[in-house]
Image (cartoon, grey):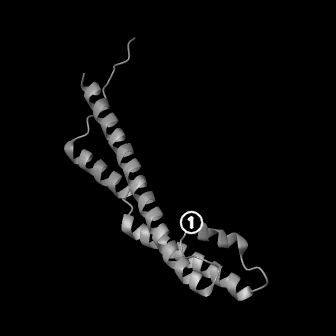
């Protein structure tokens, strides 16, 4: 006896809209500026606090490892003024890193969702044949 081959039911337009809305809700975009600001503030404050902590601890040699950042950040040194300069550099570099991360993440999620949607469309077309 032969089993009857039944095709899966086609999704109607309402279901397709519902799937698109749910995918958009689940994979929300990350705001590039918001993430950039958050990472920038954390980076700036982190460098500021680290420099200030070393300055306040004092000693004959103050923060030689952190002082190497002066090679990459013009004007930075392990001093009170250097901590303010480090705050600026940390904010700028953190913002750029956060913004780039959010942009890259959004692009990857977009490509992934397009691939899923196209795959689903192809299955719908092949199921009709």
| Residue depicted at x 64% and y 78% | 50
| Residue depicted at x 35% and y 51% | 23
As drawn, 18 above or below 66: above
- Please provide percent x and percent y for residue 75: 54, 76
13 relative to 4 in the view: left or right:
left
As drawn, 71 above or below 52: above
| Residue depicted at x 66% and y 73% | 67
Farthest top residue? 1
User: The C terminus appears in which quarter of the rendering?
Assistant: top left
- Please provide percent x and percent y for residue 61: 77, 79
> What is the secondary structure assignment of the residue under circle 1?
loop
Q: Quadrant of residue 117?
A: top left
- The residue to which callout 1 is attached is 72
**Between 42 and 28, which is closer to the camera in this rendering?**
42
User: The N terminus appears in which quarter of the rendering?
Assistant: top left
| Residue depicted at x 62% and y 78% | 77
Q: Quadrant of residue 118?
A: top left
Q: Quadrant of residue 96?
A: bottom left
As drawn, 61 above or below 69: below
As drawn, 97 above or below 114: below
- Please provide percent x and percent y for residue 81: 57, 85
98 relative to 9 in the view: left or right:
right
- Please provide percent x and percent y for residue 109: 39, 49
């Amino acid at each position: 006896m032969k089993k009857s081959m039944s095709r899966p039911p086609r999704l109607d337009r309402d279901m397709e809209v519902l799937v698109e809305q749910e995918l958009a809700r689940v994979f929300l975009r990350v705001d590039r500026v918001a993430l950039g600001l958050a990472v920038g503030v954390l980076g700036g404050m982190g460098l500021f606090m680290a420099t200030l902590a070393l300055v306040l601890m004092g000693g004959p040699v103050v923060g030689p490892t952190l002082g190497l950042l002066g090679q990459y950040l013009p004007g930075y040194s392990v001093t009170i003024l250097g901590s303010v300069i480090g705050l600026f550099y940390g904010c700028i570099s953190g913002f750029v890193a956060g913004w780039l991360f959010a942009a890259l993440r959004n692009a990857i999620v977009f490509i992934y969702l397009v691939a899923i949607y196209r795959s689903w469309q192809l299955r719908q077309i092949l199921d009709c044949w």
